[in-house]
Image (cartoon, rainbow, N blue to C red):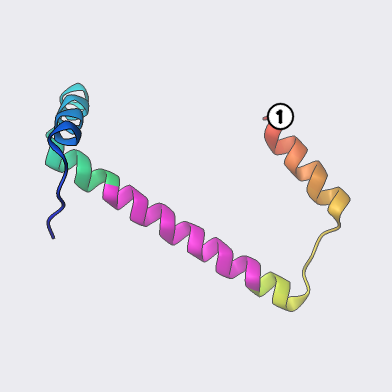
Amino acid sequence: MEVQFTPEQEAHLARIATKEGTDAERLVKDAALRLLEADSRFRAAVRDGVAQADRGDFIEEAEMDARLEKMLRS
């Protein structure tokens, strides 16, 4: 697979790679792999959520609000 970047994007990637102590190709590969892993985790979580909803496993709105508030404070 080949990905095309503008010269400006390539320069930007090269600067980031230099700061990270790697080369631009490795930087892009690593970023793409992290994206794929995150997407896979997200899709699995959505499937789990849909399965829970299908089983009728819900929480009340007040409990969800409390959970979100706790997450935002931490």
Residue 58 occupies quadrant: bottom right
Please say if 22 is above or below 42. Answer: above
The answer to whether residue 44 is magenta is yes
Q: Position of residue 67 (x, y in %)?
A: 76, 44
Question: Mark 1: which amino acid?
Answer: Arg
| In front of the other: 10 or 48 | 10
Q: In terms of secondary structure, what is the magenta stretch mainly?
A: helix
68 sits left or right of 36 in the view: right
Q: Position of residue 16 (x, y in %)?
A: 22, 27
Please say if 51 is above or below 58. Answer: below
Outermost top residue: 19
Find disc 1 in the rendering and name its residue: 73
Q: Residue at x 72, y 71 (%)?
A: 53
Q: Residue at x 13, y 42 (%)?
A: 25
Q: Dot 1: what SS?
A: helix
22 sits left or right of 62 in the view: left
Q: Quadrant of the N terminus?
A: bottom left
Q: Position of residue 14 (x, y in %)?
A: 14, 30
Range covered by the magenta-colored residues: 32-50
Q: Residue at x 64, y 66 (%)?
A: 49
Q: Quadrant of the C terminus?
A: top right
